[in-house]
Image (cartoon, rainbow, N blue to C red):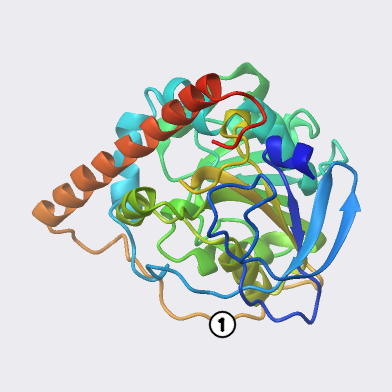
Amino acid sequence: MASSMLNGAENLTLIRGITPKGLGFGGSDLQGRHFSKVNAVASTRISKARTLTPMCSLSASRPASQPRFIQHKKEAFWFYRFLSIVYDHVINPGHWTEDMRDEALEPADLSNRNMLVVDVGGGTGFTTLGIVKHVDAKNVTILDQSPHQLAKAKQKEPLKDCKIIEGDAEDLPFRTDYADRYVSAGSIEYWPDPQRGIKEAYRVLKLGGKACLIGPVYPTFWLSRFFADAWMLFPKEEEYIEWFQKAGFKDVQLKRIGPKWYRGVRRHGLIMGCSVTGVKPASGDSPLQLGPKAEDVTEPVKPFVFLMRLILGAMAATYYVLVPIYMWLKDQIVPKGRPI
């Protein structure tokens, strides 16, 4: 178990019939000594990871229904208008490495080069580069609302045969029962209505298709929690599980990921902290019924409010650019084998 923690990965499998209650990590890390708040009714060692059946509580300091400063489509659009210039060189090295990407995509079971795959919120195509290792690029569609991010993806040679389109993760331009695999990495944190986005993932998949959603996890350290709540959506692990279940997915599993130099520490939250998968058990749309969208992008914005949210959100983002640098320095200083 210790080795899997140091690699930043652990699988959580929710068994049908278990009511989510009380999954949370109040301790400082995942070194194996801070699990007092986890209630696991069963555990089985498989390969390099450990499978837990969690009983979860859905407590959170700020509900997903209350968007953060950059958790709006319009603010996110302009945020990435500038961030796209340095995204691959500044953000990815600290939060979303190639090793993390390949590990996070493993549960997606990209086992056939002829699979139809949609990469929702694909941005600069960093995650898509991992997908096309297993699936022919001509069968992959990259969708994002940011033309500036997609422009970066178009410049990458391995992605030249991919379909690249602008679109909304909460209103996908694909027919029902279209894709074999749905992948979304680093996008849910900007969705005003995450449940709607996961419902759309269910709709566009074929019977037996699998969704793989990779995203952040909620911090427990007070300062990190403050900036997370100001910046964008950092869901708790049990929230991912509930959203998938409500959309209709079966065999819902959660795999923990993280930079190796964090040594499994999760108290600061992780911009890329888990890979959640679920299987579509029946053809057609999701059985979940939802009301109107949380955000109507056609409505006019108040310029001052828009600008203030954008500035404050960017300030909070700066904190999360510094956190991985801090963790990397601690990894260099603190002797190996000791918790950081």
Q: Secondary structure at mark 1?
A: loop
- 310 left or right, relative to 44: left
Between 207 and 253, the one nearer to me in the picture: 253
| 334 left or right, relative to 134 | left
Q: Residue at x 61, y 38 (%)?
A: 258
Q: Is residue 125 above or below residue 51?
A: above
Q: Can I make out residue 198 in this image? A: yes
Q: Position of residue 130 (x, y in %)?
A: 70, 31
Name the residue at the left extreme.
304
The image shows residue 252 at horizontal and vertical percentages of 75, 64
Can residue 279 be seen here? no
Residue 206 point in image, percent of width and height = 78, 61
Q: In what quadrant of the picture does the N terminus appear?
A: top right
In this view of the protein, which residue sits in the foreground, 188 or 125?
Answer: 188
218 left or right, relative to 85: right
Amino acid type for the residue under numbered disc 1: Gln
Provide residue 35's location: percent of width, then percent of height.
65, 59
- Which quarter shows the C terminus? top right
Which residue carries the number 1 mark? 289
Please say if 275 is above or below 129: below
Q: Is residue 11 above or below residue 260?
A: below
